[in-house]
Amino acid sequence: MKCLGIESTAHTFSCAVVDRKGKRGEILSDIRKIYGPPEGEGIHPREASRHHVETSSAVLAEALRKAKISVDDLDIISYAAGPGLGPCLRVGAVVSRALSSYYKIPIYPVNHAIGHIELGKMLTGAKNPLVLLVSGGHTMLLAFSDKKWRVFGETLDITLGQLLDQFGRSIGFASPCGKKIEDLAERNHNYIPLPYSVKGNDVSFSGLLSATKAIVNKGVEAACYSLQETAFAMICEATERALAFTKKKELMIVGGVAANKRLSAMLTSICKRQNCKFFVVPPKFAGDCGSQIAWLGLLEASVKKGTSLKNTFVKQSWRLDTVKVSY
């Protein structure tokens, strides 16, 4: 069964074709175009959605060409219905509805965050992990129980990805800033003390952001290093506590920040202490991509029929712990 997945929750417009064979999926293509805001600025939803509109047809055509199929070969279409930026979400939904309506292909609106998790499980082989989802839109510790992903810890204000992006923009970078901060942090290991805020099993990053901006005059590289070390230590404390509580024997990290090597190194140490396996989604699929949406659509299609066009939707604030998982 072949699915076209369309991702448009934020800065990325992506189309991917995934072919399900048994319990595994083969990614036939995954094409992306990323909106790049001006330096020092974040994502403007209107401008990002305009970018998606202008690039959607070329991305779709390239995804089909690379997969060596035509639209008529598709069995289903899935799109990211949320959470995300409203104007961006609507672009993916409109493209999906148009294809579904014209070619009479079943359509599936799916949760973007669960797409991160399910693709991570498929690619890494993790079976029943504690999941650390860290991206621009999410910072959550999750475990699956009674047909839902349950939250065992999350951010109380901004996400880890937002922390890195907002600090990066304050020193002149354009979003996304995580990789640039990671590279600068590797050049100077002079740690400057910063606020550390873990509350129960939740974290708070807003105070850390303000404090890091105030130490930039002591050196940008040292500030980046101190920011990473502090934020990642907070995440690791909450993660280790959740591992001990849930008694999971697997930890999997997904989301855009999963590509950070320093965070993975710190989590590896935790897993050694807790005697559990550590899984990291491949960097190529850590960020937003159509493959996440296509694979989740295929999983949904295994247990239910497609949604009627009148019931297709977008939902900017769609928490993954409200979604019943039936597959």
Image: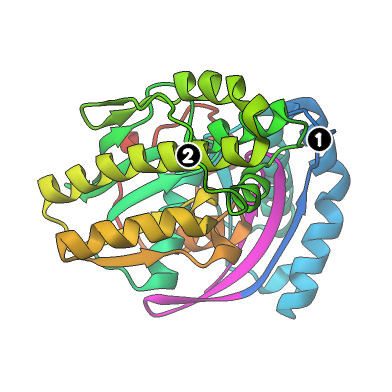
Q: Amino acid at mark 2?
A: Tyr
User: Residue shown at 27%/45% (left/top)?
Assistant: 239
Q: Which residue is mark 2?
A: 191
Residue 275, percent from left and from top: 16, 66
- From what the image shows, is residue 5 above or below residue 167? below
* In the rendered image, the vertical position of residue 138 relative to residue 261, given as above or below: above
Instruction: Tell me if I can see residue 185 in this picture.
Output: yes
Q: Dot 1: within a 10 Å radius of its alpha carbon, few (fewer than 14), some, or many (20 or more) residues?
A: some
In percent of width and height, residue 118 lies at 40, 59
Q: Residue at x 26, y 41 (%)?
A: 237
Q: Which residue is mark 1?
A: 37
Q: Residues within 10 Å of mark 2 (few under 14, many from 20)?
A: some
Return the x and y of residue 271 as percentages of the image width and height: 24, 61
Q: Does the magenta stretch mainly form a helix, a strand or a loop?
A: strand
* Residue 222, x across and y down, in percent: 58, 39
The answer to whether mark 1 and mark 2 are in CB contact below 8 A is no
Q: Is residue 217 magenta?
A: no
Marks 1 and 2, how far apart in space? 31 Å
Q: Secondary structure at mark 2?
A: loop
Res 304 visible: no
Amino acid type at image mark 1: Pro
Is residue 254 shown above or below 111?
Answer: below
Foreground label between 1 and 2: 2
Residue for point 68% across, 42% down:
176
Q: Nearer the viewer, residue 131 or 212?
A: 212
The foreground one among 199 and 139 is 199
Quadrant of the snapshot with the C terminus: bottom left
Q: Residue at x 71, y 30 (%)?
A: 169
Q: Provide the residue span drawn in magenta.
A: 1-27
**Is 64 situated left or right of 250 in this image?**
right
Magenta stretch: includes residue 17: yes
